[in-house]
Amino acid sequence: MFLGEYEHTIDAKGRLAVPAKFRSKIERGAVLTRGIEPCLCVYPLEVWEEKSRRLEEAQLDPRQRRQVERRFFAVAFECELDGQGRIVLPARFREYAGLTNEVTVIGARDRFEIWDRARWRQYIGEIRPEDLEGLDIPF
């Protein structure tokens, strides 16, 4: 499980040091893709494969399935940790998420997300307690 919030920087070559607590969870590989919000998502490879299986079983019409596949799979990128515990964020991904060199990496249960630091602070500041009231969540 991915938990916590970490402030990091992206270097001139587009590399991001993955928080140390997250590294063991992606040692066998990971998939980087665009988030629904303007952020990037990194899934451990086995989680990504499970999501793929669940998509196959989902009750979607063929058009919807193609849209989901194109939205998430066509832009996905397999990534691996380098010797210093970094992953490369290709330019097209950094552009999509509007990343500057200052980012916040957040744990989000089965994945971690990479946000531009200022955008993350704005986003999290806009979530109001009443937005979560009435939801069937165990918290």
Image (cartoon, rainbow, N blue to C red):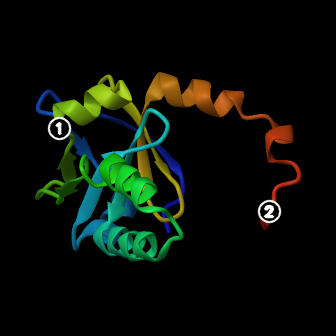
Q: Visible in this render: residue 10?
A: no
- Residue 66 position in % (x across, y down): 35, 55
Of labels 2 and 1, the one closer to you? 1
Position of the C terminus by quadrant: bottom right
Number of residues whose C-alpha sits closer than 10 Å to that of mark 2, classed few (under 14), some (14–19) or many (20 or more): few
Report the disc number at residue 118: none
- Give the alpha-carbon distance from disc 2 to disc 1, as whole Å: 36 Å
Q: Which residue is mark 1?
A: 90
Name the residue rendered at 41%, 54% in the picture.
63
> Which amino acid type is shown beneath numbered disc 1?
Pro
- Residue 59 position in % (x across, y down): 54, 70
Residue 66 against residue 126 in the figure, above or below = below
132 horizontally vs 88: left or right: right
> Which amino acid type is shown beneath numbered disc 2?
Phe
Q: Visible in this render: residue 118?
A: yes
- Residue 89 position in % (x across, y down): 21, 40
Residue found farthest to the front: 62
Of residues 55 and 51, the one nearer the viewer is 55
Report the disc number at residue 139: 2
Of residues 59 and 136, the one nearer the viewer is 59
Name the residue rendered at 80%, 40% in the picture.
131
- As helix, strand or loop, the secondary structure at mark 2 comes to loop
Name the residue rendered at 82%, 56% in the picture.
135
Number of residues whose C-alpha sits closer than 10 Å to that of mark 1, classed few (under 14), some (14–19) or many (20 or more): few
Q: Quadrant of residue 44?
A: bottom left
25 horizontally vs 75: left or right: right
Of residues 27 and 70, the one nearer the viewer is 70
Residue 86 against residue 123 in the figure, above or below = below
Q: Quadrant of residue 126?
A: top right
